[in-house]
Amino acid sequence: MKNTLFAFITLTLTLSCYGLDRDYVPRAILTREQEKEVITLAEKCGIESVSRISTHNMYPSPFRGILVQGIEQTKGREVSYQVLGMSYSKWLDPAAKPGKGDIRMGNFWAGKPYVRKQTILKVGKEEYRVGSIRDMTAEECEKILGMLLKGEYELGSAVNKKTIDQVGWEKPSSFSKRGEFISAGFLHKAKDAGFFDLQIKMTGGKIKIEQMFQAIP
C-alpha cells in the first residue's frame, strides 16, 4: 500500500512540475520525452504555444487518443483556444495510418487544429465553461445552473433518481431553448463516461426536469 501511494505521489509530482497542464487517463500517460515530441508536432501543425495535453479512451474500442490545447484568449465572457487531435500509433489499431495532409513525427501524427469557443458562466464565486448557448442569455443559463447545483429542482415521473445522481452539475456543456422547454447538457461525473441531455421546464421561478437522455460511450 505504501509503495502504491509513493508511486502515485511521485507520478503526480512528475506530471505537475514543468509548465504544462496535464490530464492523463491511467492507460495513456506520456513520458517527458514523448511530451516534447507532442509539443514539437503541435507547433508544426499550427499551435504556437501548448498550454495543455490530455489523453482519453476511445470507447468502446481499446484505443486511446491525445488532445493538445493552445493558450486561451479571453474577451469578456468569451474564451477561445486552439485544439489539436493527435494520434499515437502504439495506442491505435496496427493498421492505422496518417491521413492526407497530416504531419508525422516518429509514432505521432496530426492534422490541423481547430478553434474551440466557450462562454463563462458565473454562479456565486465559481466560474463554469459552457460550449454552446442558443436562444438564451448567459444570465438565464446562470440562474438555471445555480438552481441545479443547489439541488433546487423537481423530477418528472420519467426521470430515474439513480441516474440523475450521475450528472456532473459542475460540468455544463450546453444550454438552449426549444419552445417551452430548456435543453441543458452536462457531462457524466466520471471522466470519459458520456453525457446527459436534460429537458427542463421552468414555471413560476421553479424548475422541473421532465426528461433525461443519456449518451454512453
Image: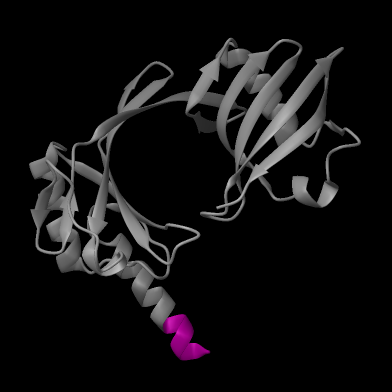
Classify 6 as above or below 194: below
* Residue found 85% across the figure and 14% down from its top: 203
146 sits left or right of 74 in the view: right
How many labels sit on residues? Answer: 0
Closer-to-camera residue (150/178): 178
Give the percent coordinates (x, y) of residue 201: 80, 20
* Residue found 80% across the figure and 17% down from its top: 202
Magenta residues? Answer: 1-6
11 sits left or right of 122 in the view: left
Give the percent coordinates (x, y) of residue 72: 29, 32
Q: Quadrant of residue 197?
A: top right
Classify 37 as above or below 183: below
Give the percent coordinates (x, y) of residue 76: 39, 16
Give yes or no for residue 156 being in the magenta stretch: no
Give the percent coordinates (x, y) of residue 145: 66, 28
* Residue found 10% across the figure and 53% down from its top: 104
* Residue found 19% across the figure and 67% down from its top: 32
Q: Quadrant of residue 30?
A: bottom left
In terms of secondary structure, what is the magenta stretch mainly?
helix
Coloration mode: one colour
**For the view shown, which residue lies furthest in the front direction?**
95
Give yes or no for residue 2 being in the magenta stretch: yes
